[in-house]
Amino acid sequence: MTQVSGLQADIVEKDLTAYLTAKIRTEIAPDDDIFATGLVSSMFAMELVVHLESTYDIAIIGPELKLDNFRTAKVMTALVLRLAEDD
């Protein structure tokens, strides 16, 4: 289990999966590519950026703003932990 700045990977992943499931009203798994399935649009990616920044007190800028960082709850968890570690 990875822990960075008080964040635990399993808890972040569980919270993000629950958030995504609630927002798109479809049960998803941590590895489900929400963009490839057509469940969300690229506009939803911006909402995800705002959610991640405000929830985890991180800044997602520059090269981190690529769609591949937002495809799955697992990938977003890695992004959150990496950026929290950089703070």
Image (cartoon, rainbow, N blue to C red):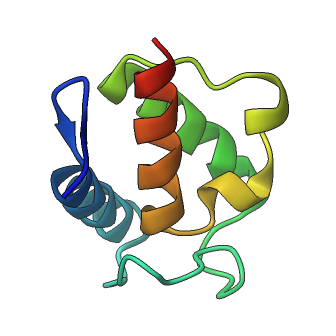
Residue 83 x/y as whole percent? 51, 28
Nearest the viewer among 78 and 23 is 78
- Residue 18 position by quadrant: bottom left
> What residue is drawn where x is 57% and y is 17%?
59
Instruction: Report the side of 39 relative to 13 (left or right).
Output: right
Nearest the viewer among 26 and 87 is 87
Residue 16 x/y as whole percent? 32, 56
> What residue is drawn where x is 34% and y is 26%?
56
Quadrant the N terminus occupies:
bottom left
> What residue is drawn where x is 29% and y is 64%?
22
- Residue 38 position by quadrant: bottom right
Instruction: Report the side of 3 relative to 78 (left or right).
Output: left
Number of numbered discs on residues: 0
Residue 72 x/y as whole percent? 53, 69
> What residue is drawn where x is 63% and y is 26%?
60
Residue 78 x/y as whole percent? 47, 51
